[in-house]
Image (tube, helix red, strand yellow):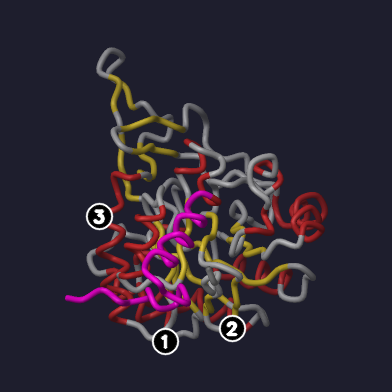
């Protein structure tokens, strides 16, 4: 039986297949190497990188919920210099396609990160995080205001030669307004959704379960919301869309592609099954063979409404 063509394009970025990792759920790649060959995936999106190292929020910062989890990690990371020196070389040596998620508290932070990563060997693209819901400043404001989101996008585009993906927040009234704004500012693709803002309470202690009080809800619980938003955004913009939110099986991934996603990112499922990405990839390949489809690209936006 002929093998289906799994290649997809995200603007100028070409991937060997549509299965990516979601930032913050796959470490810097090496952490999962005993379970997943990073070079087998479409791309590894690394843990978000800021200019300087960040310690993140105080614990407790992860809570299991029905069909998902809440996290308030707070964008803990090793910083740009630490990433380039200690984390990136592993992925480059393995031949992985590396997408670096970047985050900042100001437009100047994003400018310096874009500039600092622009010509680094082994970095294939940037994913601009303007949407993390569990820090007290920076990301949420940028991600919920179309004008600010566009401004960050413009600054990143002006200071890098790399493809730019903008990660969108679901914590808005109209996600298509933000999508249109960043597309108009030059984004090569958008990824969505980031986590939904939520909280949990310990009724015995009468205190929040998270030290940060609120955090980001992820996992299967948010999939219907994510799927709806991906469908809306895919119809609203002419740039590629990457679907994120509760994807744990090949069927989930295929639903997102039918809704208009050119690729998908797998996040919380990695904590349940470290090999989830490869299993989803194999399942998508089996579906294409079953349906006698020659290319995974035939699924993109094929939903009949």
Nearest to viewer (mark 1 / mark 3): 3
Question: Dot 3, crowdedness within 10 Å: few (<14), some or many (≥20)?
Answer: few
Q: Which residue is mark 3?
A: 224
Q: Looking at the image, is mark 2 or mark 1 earlier in the sequence?
A: 2
Q: Label 3 vs label 2: CA separation?
A: 29 Å
SS under mark 3: helix
Label 2 SS: loop
* Front disc: 2 or 1: 2
Give, as a single range, the part of the protein colored magenta.
Answer: 279-305
Within 10 angstroms of label 2, few (less than 14), some, or many (20 or more) residues? Answer: few
Residue 71: horizontal and vertical position, in percent? 43, 39
Counting residues from the start of the chain, the first of labels 3 and 2 encountered is 2
Task: Return the residue at label 1.
Answer: 184
Residue 96 percent coordinates (x, y): 70, 61
Left/right placement of residue 61 relative to residue 98 reads: left
Which residue occupies 67% across, 82% down? 161
Mark number, residue 12 = 2
Residue nearer the viewer, 31 or 186: 31
Q: Nearer the viewer, residue 205 or 29?
A: 29
Residue drawn at (38%, 75%), measured in percent from left and top? 300
Question: As displayed, is residue 288 above or below residue 270?
Answer: below
Tell me the residue at 51%/38% (across/down).
273
Residue 16 lies in quadrant: bottom right
Q: Quadrant of residue 287?
A: bottom left
């Amino acid at each position: 039986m002929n093998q289906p063509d799994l290649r997809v394009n995200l603007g100028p970025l070409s991937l060997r297949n549509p299965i990516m990792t979601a930032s913050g759920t796959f470490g810097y790649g090496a952490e999962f190497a005993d379970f997943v060959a990073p070079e087998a995936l479409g791309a590894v999106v690394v843990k978000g990188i800021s200019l300087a190292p960040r310690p993140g929020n105080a614990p407790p910062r992860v809570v299991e919920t029905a069909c998902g989890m809440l996290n308030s990690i707070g964008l803990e990371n090793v910083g740009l210099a630490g990433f380039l020196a200690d984390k990136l070389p592993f992925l480059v040596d393995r031949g992985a396609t590396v997408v670096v998620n970047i985050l900042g508290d100001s437009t100047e932070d994003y400018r310096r990160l874009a500039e600092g990563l622009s010509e680094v060997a082994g970095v294939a693209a940037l994913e601009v995080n303007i949407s993390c819901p569990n820090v007290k400043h920076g990301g949420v404001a940028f991600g919920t205001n179309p004008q600010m989101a566009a401004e960050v996008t413009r600054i990143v585009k002006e200071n890098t030669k790399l493809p730019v993906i903008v990660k969108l927040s679901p914590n808005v009234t109209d996600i298509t307004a933000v999508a249109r704004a960043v597309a108009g500012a030059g984004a090569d693709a958008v990824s969505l959704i980031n986590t939904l803002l939520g909280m949990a309470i310990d009724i015995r202690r009468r205190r929040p379960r998270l030290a940060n009080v609120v955090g980001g809800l992820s996992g299967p619980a948010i999939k219907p919301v994510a799927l709806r938003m991906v469908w809306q955004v895919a119809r609203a913009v002419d740039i590629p869309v990457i679907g994120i939110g509760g994807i744990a099986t090949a069927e989930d991934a295929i639903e997102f592609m039918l809704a208009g996603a050119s690729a998908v990112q797998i996040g919380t499922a990695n904590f349940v099954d470290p090999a989830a990405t490869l299993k989803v990839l194999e399942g998508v390949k089996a579906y294409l063979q079953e349906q006698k489809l020659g290319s995974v690209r035939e699924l993109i936006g094929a939903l009949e409404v």
